[in-house]
Image: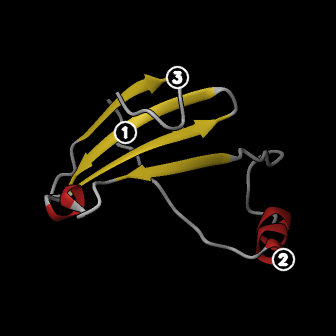
Amino acid sequence: MADEIELKLDLTREAIDALGAADFWPGEPTVAEQQSIYFDTPDQELFAAGLSLRIRRSGRKRVQTIKAEGTVRPTWQRRGSSDTTPV
């Protein structure tokens, strides 16, 4: 299995346009819109335990993900059917 590298950027609309117009990307750029919803208890018990739980929606596809902190960050994923109900 190949390693996955995820780059997260928080950009203004102008920065997104400038990045998309840069000529160092191979081929034509595409845009994928995603929405991520994170869950925790009112007392943030998951965060305190080094865990994160989210549902990410991309188009009609939803994936539930749990991640654990550590030098190697284990990740578990499962397809979901709702933005509000982790299973």
Residue type at tag 3: Ser
At a point 53% along the width and 29% down the height, the residue shown is 82
Name which of mark 1 and mark 2 comes first in the sequence: 2
- Give the structural element (helix, strand or loop) at label 2: helix
Q: Quadrant of residue 75?
A: top left
Dot 3: what SS?
A: loop
Q: Amino acid at mark 2?
A: Glu
Quadrant assignment, res 64? top left
Q: Earlier in the sequence, mark 2 or mark 3?
A: 2
Question: Alpha-carbon neighbours of circle 2 within 10 Å: few (<14), some, or many (≥20)?
Answer: few
What is the C-alpha distance between the residues marked 1 and 2? 31 Å
The percent coordinates of residue 14 (x first, y second) are: 84, 77
Image side of residue 29 versus residue 66, left or right: right
Mark 3 or 1, nearer chain start: 1
How far apart, in angstroms, are the residues tagged by discs 3 and 1? 13 Å
Q: What residue is at 21 percent from the left and 43 percent from the top?
A: 74
Question: Looking at the figure, which quarter contains the N terminus?
Answer: top left
Give the image location of residue 50, x and y in percent: 18, 59
Closest to the camera, between mark 2 and mark 3, is 3
Q: Residues within 10 Å of mark 3 (few under 14, many from 20)?
A: some
Q: Identify the residue position indicated by label 3 in the image.
A: 81
**SS under mark 1:** strand
Looking at the rendered structure, which numbered label has been put on residue 75? none
Residue 2 rendering spot, x and y as whole percentages: 36, 35
Q: Residue at x 29, y 60 (%)?
A: 42
* Disc marking residue 65: 1
> Is residue 39 toward the left or the right of residue 81 in the image?
left
Identify the residue position indicated by label 2 in the image: 14
- Judge depth for marks 3 and 1 and give the one in front: 3
Q: Nearer the viewer, residue 23 or 46?
A: 46
